[in-house]
Amino acid sequence: MSGTERFDRAAPTWDLEDRRVVLARGVAEAIAARVPLSSGLVTLDFGCGTGLVTLALAPKVGAITGADTSPGMLKTLAEKAGAAGTPVRLVALDPEGTGDLGGPYQLIVSSMTLHHIPDVPALFRRFTGQLRPGGRVALADLDQEDGSFHEDATGVHHLGFAREHIETWLKAAGFLDVQLETAIVSRKNGKDYPVFLATARVA
């Protein structure tokens, strides 16, 4: 079973695990604390999943788009957005996460998606091409870990990241004012997993 199929199957019950909801809330709060949000901010949530971060940010930004490789996750997000009366544009990505992202945007956010991307530096370069002048990214993911975070490592390409690598890759992609901080510490199976938030802007 591919990573996409696994997420498709998990989508209907994804939000029932409190840990995931708490993690997404913490990431959304960290983004709101670090990035100047406004009602006109055209925003992309890359790897949006069921939209836990998307829908948390939606009232604080302008038009918002959720992009994901999993049709099941996008379906769940569409249902949740419809029930809440929150307009969200959906973009279906191919299994490699490539394809048109529908930009340009003023803000690109992502939560717990980077470790599923084979070539993260290439993704950062792609983000620079999707941002308007002065646009920002706010990207959250795991600090480097020992492989115990995922019970099923299907579709996992990185066991978290060293923060200095994220900083180097963002700068190499043309980002300025790169900052990294801890967004939240996720507790799973009795173990703590720090989650960083990387923010940066283009010229």
Image (tube, helix red, strand yellow):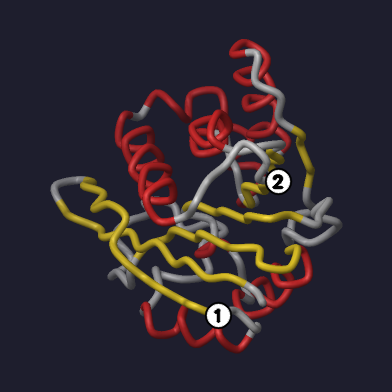
- Give how far apart the Cα atoms at labels 1 and 2 are: 20 Å
Which quadrant: the C terminus? bottom right
Q: Residue at x 46, y 81 (%)?
A: 167
Q: Residue at x 44, y 58 (%)?
A: 140
- Residues packed near mark 2 inside 10 Å, few (<14), some (14 to 19) or many (20 plus): many
* Furthest residue toward top: 83
Residue 191: x %, y % from top left? 16, 53
Q: Which picture quadrant has residue 88?
A: top right
Q: Secondary structure at mark 1?
A: strand
In the image: residue 34, left or right of residue 146: right
Q: Residue at x 51, y 59 (%)?
A: 138
**Total label count?**
2
Foreground: 121 or 105? 105
Q: Up-down: is 21 above or below 28?
A: above
- Residues packed near mark 1 inside 10 Å, few (<14), some (14 to 19) or many (20 plus): some
Q: Which picture quadrant has residue 155?
A: bottom right
Residue 147: x %, y % from top left? 33, 66
Q: Secondary structure at mark 2?
A: loop
Q: Which mark is residue 159?
A: none
In the image: residue 102, left or right of residue 50: right
Q: Label 1, on which residue?
A: 176
Q: Of the residues shown, which amino acid type is indicated by label 2?
A: Val
Q: Label 2, on which residue?
A: 42
